[in-house]
Amino acid sequence: MSISAYDRVKTARDNKRPTGLDFIHGLFTDFLELHGDRRFGDDPAVVGGVARLEGRPVTVIAIERGHGTKDRVARGFGSPNPEGYRKALRLMRQAEKFHRPVVCLIDTAGACCGIGAEERGQGQAIAENLTAMMGLNTPIVSILIGEGGSGGALALAVADRVWMLENAVYSVISPEGCASILWKDAKKADEAAKNLKLTARDALTLSVVERMIGEADLGQPPFYARLRAMLSRELTVLSEQDALLSQRYEWFRRIGTAEQEGNRDT
């Protein structure tokens, strides 16, 4: 049965869908959370720290929506503030210093757009992440596990490998926002979703991501075991590459061109 693009959006937003912390606990061991950006404060929408992936020390950073109303409110519904992105960048630079690969788990409707976030330099924080990640001299794998909204998602997605779960979405704007702008009617979100090409299959076809991950057993131990093995193999490959930064740069330069590499579907 065919599933519409907007149905994928609703699935990505489902309250029962595993969040960033669920993935951390399912994939990694010995997770030690680290807090704060050393400039303003700690953002609970971004969870990060040091962990082990099949014995390998890694830095893991996740955008966390929370479970239940109280938790979601406390975490800003997974919309990071500037201090969240700066915390992520601090941890990534620490990972580079100690030669640890970085794994990012992305699930956000977009960065926080409140007045306080703008006053504290939201746009600059995102831009600094984009610039720094392009030159970060350690392997980076980013996985879109739910919503991937605009620059709020892209700020953790400049990576050597960008993967996407089957029912995740990745878009410059929400379908409702797009419909409100184009047709002055948010009720046309289903039509907007179709035209935004925001599904994992679309992103794979357009070479925006490299791999689509099936969700038949999402959240179950076999799912995490499979993804853990994929991550471990990929990090081993990336750690042995001599031209990591140039290959990362060329991948993003080629997005949207006829010369882009073939896609892999898992």
Image (tube, rainbow, N blue to C red):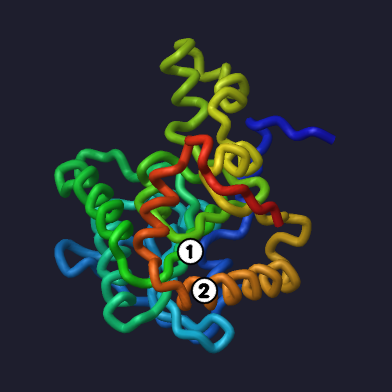
Number of numbered discs: 2
Quadrant housing residue 190: top right
From the viewer's perspective, tell me whether residue 164 is left or right of residue 176. Answer: right
Which element carries disc 2, helix, strand or loop? helix
Taking the spot 27% from the left edge, 80% from the top edge, the residue there is 97
Viewport quadrant of the N terminus: top right
User: Quick check: 256 left or right of 221?
Assistant: left
Q: Position of residue 153 (x, y in %)?
A: 42, 48
Q: Which mark is residue 235?
A: 2
- Count neighbours of disc 1 (C-alpha within 10 A) and say few if under 14, some if 14 to 19, many if 20 or more: many
The residue lying at 53 percent from left, 58 percent from top is: 143
Label 1, secondary structure: give it: strand
Which amino acid type is marked by label 1? Val
Vertical placement of residue 186 versus 125, above or below: above
Report whether 251 appears left or right of 169.
left
* The C terminus lies in quadrant: bottom right
Q: Which mark is residue 210?
A: none
Callout 2 environment at 10 Å: few (<14), some (14 to 19), or many (20+)?
many
The residue depicted at 48 percent of the width and 36 percent of the height is 256
| Residue that sits furthest to the right in the current view | 1
253 horizontally vs 259: left or right: left
Q: CA distance from mark 1 to mark 2?
A: 8 Å
Residue 9 visible in the shown view: no
Q: Inspect the image, locate mark 2, and give the three-letter code of the amino acid beneath it.
A: Leu
Label 1 or label 2, whichever comes before in sequence order: 1
Q: Which residue is mark 1?
A: 141
- Decide which of 209, 103 is in the foreground and name it: 209
Residue 7, relative to residue 64: is it above or below? above
Q: Do the residues bearing badges 1 and 2 touch, measured as CB atoms within 8 Å?
A: yes
